[in-house]
Image (tube, coloured by chain):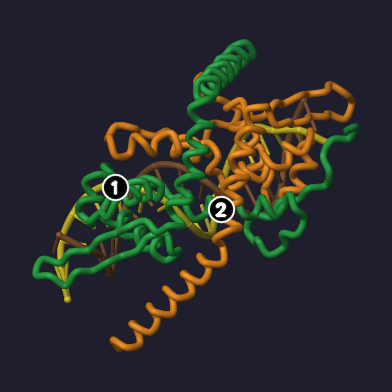
Chain colours: A green, B orange, C brown, D yellow
DNA sequence: CCGTATCCGAAAAGATACTG
DNA sequence: CAGTATCTTTTCGGATACGG
């Protein structure tokens, strides 16, 4: 590879023009991340993968989440078919959320990502430290 | 402003808190996504995985990205040790960005995610359509 | 108990003129 | 060519009062 890069283009906002194999993969990944990149989506998927969870239960287990974000995230995941919402018309309302098989498969892929993170989190932290130190040194040097 | 870093400060990624047991399992995944969750990170990693890419080259191939976001994303990826930045002190400045081995491993995991997306994008689109239709029907029904 | 509606601040992202 | 500085727009997320 003398001149490196093979003319790969990546379209972010409009996944319509994904044609080459490389861009196809790019659009799919971006699509996935778009659906799961929410601040709380993964946490909710994790809990609901363990078994059915009720609204308040999720609010308690995913600590730090606000009611609003819990509702929004649940709605989006349900809309994408990653969660099923079951309402029991009992006297105190009871609603259960469960991860769908599709979501469980996604979870498996996320475990792959977690493996990558665990393997390299140390190196990444060190890289950050080195970068920041070098930057600070260059900054004070120039000044 | 002696501390006011004249360069670009970290604006893309945000720190995470991992305290509760429920979200602890998701933490590593969230950490990964936090590092790559930028709107353009994946696109840039994909291109630079193909081979060394120059600044303007990236600007052309990652369509829609602004100069600012390109710089910001490149800096963050470099800081995390996912990209190497090589400067050639030639007369027209030449800078090349290349994905590190760590980034290439991440890319492999992302391909896994892409596989998931390709397998289920159809079902997800259908789920969305069904959800929206049902919602619209309920809305007009109530009114 | 399970949400929805509303307001607000923070953060991300876009556009672009300017520079070594 | 490869950025930086600055401004504006947009989106995200938190708090919370209210409703079924």
Residue at the (22%, 56%) spot, across then down? A54
Callout 2 environment at 10 Å: few (<14), some (14 to 19), or many (20+)?
A: many
Quadrant containing the C terminus of chain B is bottom left
Give residue B98's position: percent from left, percent from top: 73, 31
The residue that mark 2 highlights is B116
The numbered mark 2 sits on a residue in which chain? Answer: B
Using the image, tell me which numbered label, if any, was put on residue A65: 1
Q: Tag 2's secondary structure? A: helix
Left or right: A110 in relation to A55: right
Callout 1 environment at 10 Å: few (<14), some (14 to 19), or many (20+)?
A: some
Q: Quadrant of residue A56?
A: bottom left
The numbered mark 1 sits on a residue in which chain? Answer: A
Front one among B93 and A111:
A111
Residue at the (35%, 87%) spot, across then down? B140
Give residue B40's position: percent from left, percent from top: 62, 46
Residue at the (54%, 53%) spot, across then down? A32
Give residue B80's position: percent from left, percent from top: 57, 27
Q: Tag 1's secondary structure? A: loop
Name above or below for residue A66 compared with residue A118.
Answer: below
Q: Quadrant of residue A88?
A: bottom left
> Extreme left residue here?
A91
Name above or below for residue A37 compared with residue B17.
Answer: below
């Amino acid at each position: 590879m003398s001149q490196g890069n093979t003319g790969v283009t990546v379209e972010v906002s409009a996944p319509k023009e994904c044609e080459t194999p490389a861009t196809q993969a790019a659009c799919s990944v971006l699509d996935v991340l778009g659906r799961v990149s929410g601040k709380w989506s993964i946490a909710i998927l994790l809990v609901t993968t363990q078994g059915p969870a009720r609204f308040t239960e999720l609010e308690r287990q995913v600590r730090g989440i606000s009611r609003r974000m819990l509702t929004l995230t649940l709605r989006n995941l349900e809309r994408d078919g990653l969660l099923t919402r079951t309402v029991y018309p009992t006297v105190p309302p009871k609603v259960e959320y469960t991860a769908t098989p599709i979501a469980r498969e996604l979870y498996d892929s996320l475990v792959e990502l977690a493996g990558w993170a665990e393997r390299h989190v140390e190196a990444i932290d060190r890289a950050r430290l080195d970068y920041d130190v070098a930057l600070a040194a260059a900054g004070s040097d120039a000044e």
